[in-house]
Image (cartoon, rainbow, N blue to C red):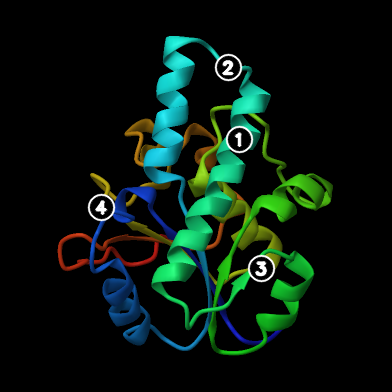
């Protein structure tokens, strides 16, 4: 694996409606230490709509899971449309070739989730409602040996204790089950001047 630090950055779906989202991310990226930044867009309102449909008439968990994965492809393209200077990659082999550079990539996780994730070492992600883009970003950070996982969201958690992040629904239930494998995690409030919590050790 490359010696260049890898920073996986989950861009929360709740941020996607910010008219100046691209500028906020650019400003935040410019303030970070050198690394290859991998941006993963959350499902946002699209995934929320899927959950509403599930409440009205239950959808099989595996089917809902993969439909939400497909929606993350849509939001990745939306993020790329707002930040066209950052390449959008959907092939994990190409991603591995890029991470040696101190630059940035928007990663569409769909093909990786369907074809590669379940074959990689470590805790695999189940096809259930317990998994959201938080755990997907975490799983990618694990398999890439990332030095840090950043959660860009609309708020900070009540505290920086990893076991409380899932309990307070700040992240999905699966996230805490990845705890032993995850790199340091840094929640960032990108909505209100993004005050930061130091990485949790």
Which residue is tagged 4? 154
> Image height check: is 152 above or below 86?
above
x then y, percent, for residue 155: 23, 51
Crowd rating for badge 3 (residues with CA inside 10 Å; few <14, some 14–19, many 20+): some
Report if residue 169 is visible in the image.
yes
Q: Which residue is mark 2?
A: 59
State left or right for residue 158 relative to residue 171. left
Label 2, label 1: how many angstroms apart (C-alpha)? Answer: 10 Å
Q: Left of 141 or right of it: where is 134?
A: left
The reply to whether discs 4 and 3 touch (Cβ–Cβ < 8 Å) is no
Q: Residue at x 56, y 89 (%)?
A: 102
Q: CA distance from mark 2 to mark 4?
A: 28 Å
Q: Which tag, 1 or 3, sits closer to the chain's start?
A: 1
User: Which quadrant holds the N terminus?
Assistant: bottom right
Q: Is residue 201 visible?
A: no
Q: Disc 3 and disc 2: Cα gap in Å?
A: 34 Å
SS for tag 3?
Answer: loop
Q: Residue 143 or 82: which is nearer the viewer?
A: 82
Q: Nearer the viewer, mark 3 or mark 2?
A: 2
Q: Earlier in the sequence, mark 1 or mark 4?
A: 1
Residue shown at the point (47%, 78%) measured from the top left:
84
Residue 122 vs 149, above or below: the answer is above
Residue underneath mark 1: 67
Labels 1 and 4 touching (C-beta < 8 A):
no
**Circles 2 and 1: CB distance less than 8 Å?**
yes
> Residue 78 at what x, y percent from top left?
45, 60
Name the residue that disc number 3 marks. 145
């Amino acid at each position: 694996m490359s010696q260049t630090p890898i920073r996986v950055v989950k861009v929360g779906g709740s941020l996607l409606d910010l008219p100046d989202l691209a500028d906020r991310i650019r400003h935040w990226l410019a303030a970070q230490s050198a690394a290859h930044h991998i941006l993963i867009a959350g499902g946002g309102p699209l995934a929320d709509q899927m959950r509403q449909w599930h409440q009205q008439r239950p959808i099989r968990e595996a089917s809902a899971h993969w439909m939400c994965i497909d929606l993350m492809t849509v939001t990745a393209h939306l993020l790329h449309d707002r930040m066209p200077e950052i390449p959008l990659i959907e092939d994990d082999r190409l991603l591995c070739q890029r991470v040696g550079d101190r630059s940035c990539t928007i990663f569409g996780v769909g093909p990786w989730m369907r074809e590669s994730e379940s074959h990689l070492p470590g805790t695999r992600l189940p096809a259930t409602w317990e998994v959201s883009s938080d755990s997907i970003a975490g799983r990618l950070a694990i398999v890439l040996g990332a030095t840090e996982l950043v959660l860009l969201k609309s708020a900070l958690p009540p505290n920086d204790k990893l076991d409380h992040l899932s309990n307070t629904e700040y992240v999905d239930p699966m996230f805490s089950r990845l705890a032993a494998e995850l790199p340091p995690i840094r929640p960032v409030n990108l909505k209100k001047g993004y005050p930061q919590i130091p990485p949790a050790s």
